[in-house]
Image (cartoon, rainbow, N blue to C red):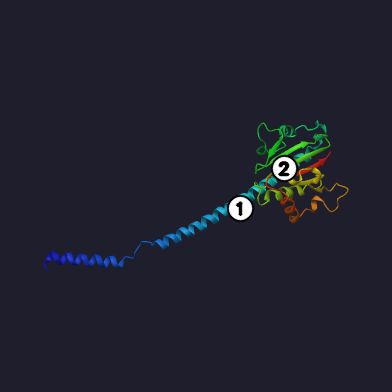
Amino acid sequence: MNLFDFFSFSSLAHNERKQADVPLCGRSMVEMLGVLAIIGVLSVGAISGYSKAMMKYKLNKQTEQINQVMMALVEHKSIFTTLAASESIVPIFNKLNALPPEMIKQNDNYFIYDVFNTPIQLALSSDGNKFYFSFSFTEQNDPNHDICRNILESLKGYAAEISALGVNSTTAEDMNQQEWWYGDGDSGHEDKRIHQLNVSTMHSLCEQCDKNFCGIYAIWYL
């Protein structure tokens, strides 16, 4: 073996020993698929958690909006008796800055809208003897009845002010066929008071809503 061959052999042997000492850094396909599966599971969980958190935020926001409107209605109730029958309430309350600005749409004088974009009508009856605070939505917008139950729960806190609270669907469009619950000032209906509404009852009421329409009506008798 000449000197050149000796150095070549020594260099090759050194490189083989060096490579043998270095662990493999590659990943198998199975390991990569496992990592991707874990990432996928975590992503689904994160999206689900975000959706639930966003829904909870919107329900809390809706409750806040309903409370703001109810307080405005109670504070300015005396105005109702001075209005002509069927006169729109929204422009008047808008001028008084009595309604949350995010609930008002430009050039819409008959409806305000909550965080779910639910149309809410504030109106006097045609005879001028009743005031309506009504919500209209479909089961497609509220498949789990969360919005419906939240509205009822929010209005329940105003049993002293509301004369009657009704729920109906397209199967009960006639006002007389709706299921009604009554305020503290009502002289009868002791077994159907608004303040007696519980979670089970509200769930049953909201289940009456079908895929076409659901209405919730709060009424004051003036």
**Quarter placement of the N terminus:** bottom left
The image quarter in which residue 20 lies: bottom left
Query: Residue 157: which numbered mark, if any?
Result: none
Q: Residue at x 59, y 51 (%)?
A: 51
Comparing 207 with 51, the one in front is: 207
Are the residues at dot 1 and dot 2 in contact (C-beta closer than 8 Å)?
no
Q: Which residue is mark 2?
A: 135
Which quadrant holds the C terminus?
A: top right
Give the residue drawn at x 61%, y 53%: 52
Residue 181: image x %, image y %? Answer: 81, 49
Place residue 25 in its image quadrant.
Answer: bottom left
Q: Earlier in the sequence, mark 1 or mark 2?
A: 1
Residue found at x 23% / y 66%: 14
Q: Mark 1 = which residue? A: 52
Query: In the picture provided, is 159 more to the left or to the right than 104?
Result: right
Depicted 158 relative to depicted 86: above or below: below
Q: Is residue 81 visible?
A: yes
Q: Secondary structure at mark 1?
A: helix
**Relative height, residue 222 to residue 21 (above, below):** above
- View extreme (right): residue: 187
